[in-house]
Amino acid sequence: MDINRISELNQQADLIRKMSIESIANFGSGHIGGTSSIIETLTSLYFECANVDPSNPSWADRDRIVLSKGHAAVGLYATLAAKGYFDKSELLTLNQNGTNMPSHCDMRKVTGVDFTAGSLGQGISAAVGMAIAAKMDRKKYRVFTIVGDGESQEGQVWEAVMLAGSRKLNNLTVFVDNNGMQIDGMTNDICKVAPFEDKYKAFGFKVITVDGHDIEAIVDAINTAAGVRRPTAIILNTIKGKGIKCCEGTPASHSVAFTDEMFAAENTGEVLSK
């Protein structure tokens, strides 16, 4: 990928991260850790790889993007706003009374969201169903889903993976946000699910492991997945709270109270009113 394009995408990711932080800070709390760890993946999908159209969000042939780890919704909302699905000022209503932007993504309320998520494990199951539907309807759209490493302790995740591998769903790409942490501590201390590579390979997936904050590597992996004859798992080695000084690399960043002082200390400035 051209170096100038990589720079543009990194700048876009920085903006989306800032938008997410400001949205959370405006409400006073939120799921900042697991949101920030997937910003580069969301940027790679919506601004480079996925076939979507903000002017026609219900387009039948669009690629589907399912955020199975639905608590990272603010990152998805910020990405959709940056892409032009709705005005970015709406992000300042996050979790407010009467908002259309709840803490977990809701396809009934937010334009561009493909699946209502929050109950862990259900998103990847729905994504597998979407991929099967595409095959049955002879459609060429791709289905992408982002799953958390802590979420992967849900048995439903592996039922979905088993079915996807059995059906050889080459139109399905699963991203695993492998940040090593969940709400109660280190993922492997609570219920070890690693190594993800071996598990997905055992179920018939093509597996690619990348630095989850390296946009060029993520885009290359997505493009590689388009050319294989089975489903692909992209294991994203990420940092929880990436790019947020007060939260980076701590399990406590899963959901935190975020004060005006903390926001000011990030030196991001207000970007949603501009």
Image: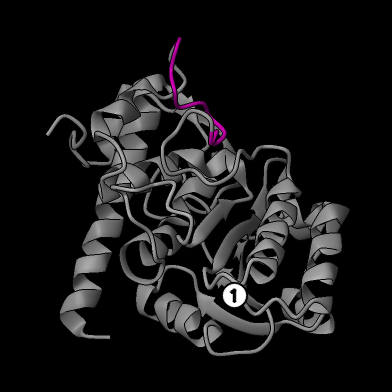
What's the magenta bit mostly, secondary-structure-wise?
loop
Q: Residue at x 45, y 10 (%)?
A: 97
Q: Is residue 36 magenta?
A: no
Q: Quadrant of residue 18?
A: top left
Q: Is residue 103 magenta?
A: yes
Q: Is residue 192 visible?
A: no
Q: Which residues are magenta?
A: 97-107
User: Toward the viewer: 109 or 256?
Assistant: 109
Report x, y in % for residue 259: 37, 23
User: Toward the viewer: 31 or 62?
Assistant: 62
Note whether 39 is above or below 23 in the view shown. Answer: below
Note whether 188 is above or below 268 in the view shown. Answer: below
Among all residues in the image, which is located at the extreme top? 97
Q: Is residue 166 left or right of residue 55?
A: right
Report x, y in % for residue 185: 71, 47
Q: Which residue is mark 1?
A: 234
Residue type, numbered disc 1 = Ile
Among all residues in the image, which is located at the extreme front? 137
Quadrant of the rendering where the N terminus is positioned: bottom left
Q: Quadrant of residue 201?
A: bottom right
Report x, y in % for residue 51: 39, 66
Note whether 208 is above or below 114 in the view shown. Answer: below
Report x, y in % for residue 164: 77, 71
Q: Is residue 51 visible?
A: yes
Q: Residue at x 35, y 38 (%)?
A: 21
Q: Residue at x 21, y 85 (%)?
A: 2
User: Toward the viewer: 254 or 252?
Assistant: 254
Q: Residue at x 33, y 30 (%)?
A: 91
